[in-house]
Every structure is written in structure tokens, then in C-alpha cells.
Image (tube, rainbow, N blue to C red):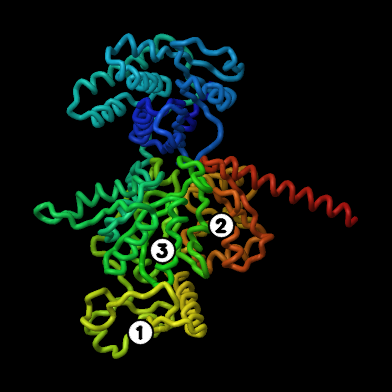
Amino acid sequence: MTNRINDFIVRFANVNGTGSASANYLFAKTIFRMGIPVTPKNIFPSNIQGLPTWYEVRVSEKGYLGRREGIDLMISVNPQSMAKDVQSVKAGGYFIYDSTKKLNLDYYREDIHYLGIPMMEMSNQAFEDPRKRQLLKNIIYVGALVRLLEMDETTIRGLIEEQFEGKKALIDANFKALRLGMDYVESHFEFPLNFKLAKRDLLKNKILVDGNTACGLGAVYGGATVMAWYPITPSTSVAEAFERFCKEYRKEEGGKNRFAIIQAEDELAAMGMVIGANWNGSRAFTATSGPGISLMSEFLGLAYFAEIPAVLIDVQRAGPSTGMPTRTQQSDLISAAFASHGDTKHVLLFPESPKECFEMTAESFDLAEQLQTPVILMTDLDLGMNDHVSEAFEWENKREFKRGKVLTAKELEDIGRYGRYLDPDGDGIPYRTYPGTHPTKGAFFTRGTSKDEYAAYTEDGAAYKRNMDRLIRKWDTAKKMVPPAEVTYSSDPGNLGILYFGTSTYSSEEARDLLAENEIYVDSIRIKAFPFGKEVADFVDSHRIVFIIEQNRDAQMRKMMMMELDCNPKRLVSVLNYDGMPITADAIKNQIIQYLNLENNANHELSKTVV
């Protein structure tokens, strides 16, 4: 039997609310501590408890961090989902189940292996507390995996001691449950699996962290002192992380807070508070998801037109309406980019990892103030709520905040007549002030209605047009300030390209390698921001076909490129996924190959017709 080392997918099928999440995370974190690249995905329902939940762990010696299709090892302890769980195991795979009760004969397949472990029976016999029995049953199956996969026992025991530090009774109980699972495997199963784990040293300077935590820390380092928000899945933990870090880093001597976190009555109010705080000179932000973007649109338009900095973190989920609150998508692109009525465009940033969540959150405050406009960080549930292997965060302590064009009292005094919406530099960005800077100049609100260069209300069409034209000049300036796209050429550069962004990156890069195995070579470009820089247009112009990989139904990135780049739409071919699960490398590869096969067949038929 061939042994694959550090290359397989494990899925846990549990019931929400049974304490399985901590056991499953213990399994994934042990692999991480063993120095092996690992990608865990928590797939959970939007109710409190009682429905099926899954936890998928991919192990990849090569460092592929996206999803692949096919489950090698299923640990199924939920009768509700067992029929589906059995079918998801690929041929030759393994199905571990709780054999306390006899397995339904309908769940048997001839092409997979079955490993029954009486988990609940063992837990009932070993532990007296009914609540602990359910929780420790989960540790029993982790113990079984320790032996089946040849995991490092010392590492997992160390993690248990870390988790329950100072609680000897809990440590002892978990050790006992772990040993029960290990001993059962040793005494009942004689054949090895055809894959296993082996310690490596592949994760130097790497951390395991979720994107929402990274955003919360990035906001602190980016200078944010105010957050206004309304709870919504999957963005709530951004606020929780920001509060946690503020309590550590935003305290004066004596314990006085140097931050304000306000839970508003709704998303619109939250955005209004953010705009007010930024107008007043603070660095303020909010976090939400798709429904919140819809509600905030009116105030986002105000911030765009009045030219007030604002930062918004959009942790995207499946819509429309309530949609699937605990599933991931990249489906807010158009609603965020053009939020509000009228001619409005917002700067978007697309992080692909927790490290970029940290960096881009911090950077978004600089961009918002320099451009005097809202900046929206576009993450998603997969990046925000799942743990990812990431490069460690770095920060230059000498780094200074970029506040943009802010006039001092002396500059206001020397300038003569101050025009808030004048464009003396030709870059579309006017000069602003903080309230109270000067006793008579510069401290005023502006309306969301039309105004002239001196912020005086007017409905003169010529003045309105001058203002709108200046905002487009500022948009062109933004193209040079946002992070540029990242271009990678294949070993055999040709006329095919792939374009991706955000969490599609992981699977897209692996798909590029899978295509090369099929002798299909593609160049690639990763979009990091909207507006698009010149490099994006150049990439499209230099390739016959560019496959645009995105996780929504309506090909929103493709539509935005068609609108902004004025490129030939026939060159842009969509590769889509919108089932609420992160896109897989297999799906990308298969869609591209299918398109190329159809194209080749069509060309062949055309050539026969011509002849």
C-alpha cells in the first residue's frame, strides 16, 4: 500500500453545539505545530445548535492552502448527515463512525473502508458527568486519529495543557479520552491508512490566525480610535478583536481608555457615526457584511460627495437578502464599488491572507485620508472566520500616518480665501481642515447637495459638473495610489491568462499548477484593488483569453472590468463558484479545460465547414 505523506483531506461531521469545534481545532493546530501546511474550514449553520456542521482540514506538503475536492478520511458522528457524508468520501477513502449503534446498511459502499469506534459507549463508561461525556467523545476520535495518522503525541498533549492551563482535572480528563481513542485503534485495527503525517519544518515565521482578528489588529496599528458597528455575521469578530486589542494597546496610565467602540442601532447609524468621527479628525471605521452595505449606501454616498474619509470592512457572505449568513461568497463587489445612487465610485481593497488583512486595514486609513473618500476592505467569511497559515505580521515602528492634505491654522491664515473644493494641484484632491484648527476659517460642515468650490450651496449645473469632473480626476489619482496588481508569468508564457483576487488566490494558484500538468500554461494576475491600475489593462490586452475567477453568480468582477477598462468582453471568460463553499482548484481547472475543449471543437467544426 502506497503511503502519501502530508497530502490528504479530513472532514469531521458533527452536530452544532456539541463542543466538537474545539476538538477539531485541536487536531488542525497539532498539524500546524508539527510544521506541516494545513488549511481548516469550519462549515457551520446559522442557528445556535442542533443542525449538521462540518470541519474540513486539508494537509498539503506542497503548501497548497485552497480547497481540493474529494474527502480521504471522514469522521462522521452525526446521524442526520451520515448518508451525505458517506457519499462524499472518494473511492479508496476511509469512513470513521461511532459504532455505539449499528451502522445503517444503506450507508455501505464497496469502494471505501469502514472503521467503527464505539465513541459514545467508551465515553459513557469512562466519565460520569453527562456534559463531559459528550465533549470528551470528541477527544476520543481525535485520539484515534493520533494513532491512525501517526501524529506527534507530545505536540497534541502540549496543546491540551496550553488550552486548560491551571485546570488539572480538565487536562487529566482530556488525556484520558485521548488515550482511549489511541488504545482502541492499537487493539482493533491491524492495517495502516494509505496516508499519514510526518513532522516537517515548513512553517518558519508562520502563524495560524483568522482574517477578522488580523483586521482588528490592523485597525489598531493603522491608528483607529473609534469603531461604530452593528452586529452581523460574519463580521462581528472584527469588532471583538478590535476591542480586545484596544484594551491592551489603547490604555493611558491609570487605565483610562483612549478608544471608543459604539454599538449603533443599525448599520446606517454606524456609518453616520464613522463619518462624523472622521470629519472631526479621528480615524474611525466600521465592519459589516452585504446587508449592511445595502443599509449604509446612503451615508457612503454622502462621504463620497462631501469627501470625508471613512473605512469599512466588508466580510462578504452569500446573498441576496439574508441569503446564507454562514457561507462565503465574493458577491458584494458591485454593490460596494458603486454604493449609493448617482455617479459614485468607491476604493476597494482585496486581501488574500490574514497578513494582507492586517496590512491593508492599516493602509486603508492612510488611503481614506489621503483621498478623502471611503475605502472598503473586501474580505469574506472564509478569510474572516477561518484560520489560515499566514506570514507573521510586520510593522515598521518609525512608520508615520499619512493624513493627506490637511491645512494648519497658519496655512489657513496665509491662504487668503479658503476653498474647500478647489483643486490647486490638479490631482482632484482638495485641501481640508480639522474642526477648531482656526477660529474663523475652515471649520464647517458641507451638505450632501451640490456646491461650488467654496462649499457654498448651488444648483448651478456648471458648478455641479466641475465638481463631478474633479472627482473623476481624483479617481484617476487613486489608480496610482492603491496597491498594484501582481503579475506572474508561467514557465511557457502564452496567450492564456487567469485573473483572481481575495481568497480565490489559493485555489487559483494551485489550479495554475494543475493546468500545467495538462500542458496548459497560463499567466496570472492577482487584483489587489479597485480602481484598476494600468497593469490590469495591459495584462488583458496582451492575452487572447483571460479567465476571471470569482465566487459569485453574476461575474461581477468581469462586469466591473468591462465598465472600467473598456476591454473586449470576448477576451474575458468567467470561471464561477457560488454554492457558498470556497472555490476549489479542481473546479477552476475543469471549467478552464472544458472551455478550451469546446473552443477547439468549435474551431474544428468551423474549419471543416470552410473546407
Q: Are the residues tagged 1 and 3 within 8 Å (C-beta)?
A: no
> In this image, 230 relative to 335: left or right?
left
Q: Distance between the residues labelled 2 and 1?
A: 37 Å
Q: Mark 2 belongs to which amino acid? A: Met
The image quarter containing residue 224 is: bottom left
Q: Residue placed farthest to the left in the image?
A: 254
Give the labeled residue for mark 2: 557
Pick whichever of labels 3 and 2 is earlier in the sequence.
3
Give the labeled residue for mark 1: 419
> In this image, 4 relative to 403: left or right?
right
Residue 409 to residue 261: above or below: below
> In this image, 170 relative to 530: left or right?
left
Mark sitting on residue 375? none
Nearer to the camera, 232 or 84: 232
- Which residue is rendered at x = 58% and y = 25% of the image? 87
The image quarter containing residue 88 is: top right
- Which residue is rendered at x = 39% and y = 15% of the image? 119
Mark sitting on residue 299? 3
Asked which secondary structure carries label 2, the reply is helix
Nearer to the camera, 443 or 70: 443
Q: Nearer the viewer, mark 2 or mark 1?
A: 1
Residue 58 to residue 378: above or below: above
> In this image, 590 relative to 191: left or right?
right
Pick whichever of labels 1 and 3 is earlier in the sequence.
3
